[in-house]
Every structure is written in structure tokens, then in C-alpha cells.
Amino acid sequence: MQSSIFNLQPSIPAIILAGGLGTRLRGVINDLPKPMAMINNKPFLHYVFLYLTKQRIDKAILSIGYKAQIIEAYFGDKYLDVEIVYSREEEPLGTGGGIKKAFALVDDSAFVLNGDTFFDIDLNALKDFHAETKADISLALKTMQNFDRYGTVEMKGERIIKFEEKKPVEEGLINGGVYLLNREMLDRVDADKFSFEKEVLEKYVSVRQINGKVFKNYFIDIGIPEDYTKAQLDFIKLFE
């Protein structure tokens, strides 16, 4: 896999959201958590950890829920030189609730990655962008063509000014599922169960500095069988 950065300071941990059920993949992966879907005889999360090692991230917080014991048994307390701690949901907390619970194990800021998408971006570039633009939240964005699976974002300079609902789009910027955010943004939400997209991103987009950086790097979401199959071929080249 090509990775353009090898000097990332290891002080910023990565939270990986790995509690997904994989409902749309149920006929393909049987009863596994979605991040444990096998790609060329390795779980999808294996490739996320391989990516993190290339980015010099040395600590990950795995936010787990559904069939959590399967993930814990496979990855243990350390995997590919990445220290792992677990934030376990006893009941589904939504994306926001899962991130907020995981942030209890974080001092200040953290990268947040979806455990069922892979966006091969330079985390150091996102970190620098976050600092330079004095952002509260920084999103990695991807330009996509002819899609209806994702919502889009509207930009003004580097600032995101609006999140649009899913609809057929010829070309648009999507949220690539990689963030850098400050703990304070989660502390503002007085709830344990909530949507990060609705109660943080959409709620605060007009009043806080929520910025987006566009990356042209490889992106895939294995949420549907077609892309799960595509990942089998793509990852042979990406991780050879």
C-alpha cells in the first residue's frame, strides 16, 4: 500500500467505529460484525490496522457492540504494533454515542474512522489542516460521481456550510468517514445515545468551525455486496 507519510506524531489516537451489524451484508458474511467481514482471508479491520501502522498511529480505541467478543478475541490488546483498548457498548448508542463513549479514553483530540470504510488518506495532512484552520472538527472528503448512497457536503472555502441528505447526484463531495475532532465537541451533547451526523455535524455546522479537506485517494465502503466483492480485488493491489 502506498502511504505518503512516516512522521506522524503518535500522540493522537484513532477511534475505530466497529459496532456495525452489517445488515445489508448478512447473506455474504453470515452473523459476523461488519468490520469482521473477510477480505482475502483477513477481516476488514486487519487492513484498517495495517493502514494505521503505515500512518504511525500507535494506539487505537475500538468502539464495539454487536458480537464484540469476536473482535476482542481476534485482535486482543495489541495488533500489528498498535495498542488496543476497547470501548464496549452494552446497547446501541448511535454513531455519536459510540464516539462520545470512546472519547472517555482520550485526553483531548482523536482521529475517528469508520470500521467498514477504507479511505487511504494522509492523516498527517489532515492533522496539519485541522491545526492551520483552527477547526473544531475536520472531515476527509471525497469527490464522487453518479451516486445516491451518500449525503453530500456544501463548501465555502475550507469550511463546510451545509450537509445535504442522500439523493441522486451526478457529482459531489461526500463525507469519507475519517475525522479529527476535539473532545469538547462531544461534551456539548447532553445525551449518551445520539447520531454524530445529526446532533454534532448538522447541528453545529453554522456556528462552529467544521472544515473539510478533499483527498483524491482510494475510498471504498463495504456496506453493500457489490463493493464488498470489489474490495477483494482492490486490496490485493493496495496491500501487495
Image (cartoon, rainbow, N blue to C red):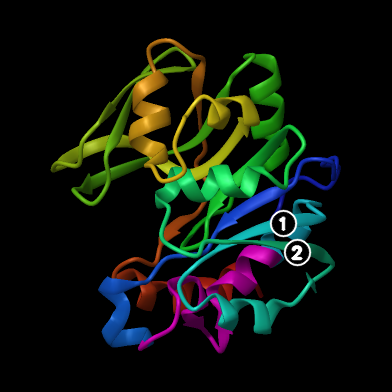
Q: Which residue is mark 1?
A: 60
Name the residue type under label 2.
Ile
Q: What label does residue 186 carry, if any?
A: none
Q: Does 210 appear above or below 179? A: above
Q: Earlier in the sequence, mark 2 or mark 1?
A: 1
Question: Observer-nearest residue: 12 or 67?
Answer: 67
- Image: magenta residue range: 30-49
Residue 142 pos. (x, y %): 42, 40
In three-dimensional space, the C-alpha distance between marks 2 and 1, rounded to whole angstroms, equals 5 Å
117 on left or right of 112: left
- Do we see residue 1 in this rendering? no
Name the residue type under label 1.
Ala
Dot 1: element: strand
Q: Is residue 44 magenta?
A: yes
80 on left or right of 161: right
Residue found at x 62% / y 25%: 184
Q: State the quadrant of the C terminus.
A: bottom right
Q: What label does residue 84 carry, if any?
A: 2
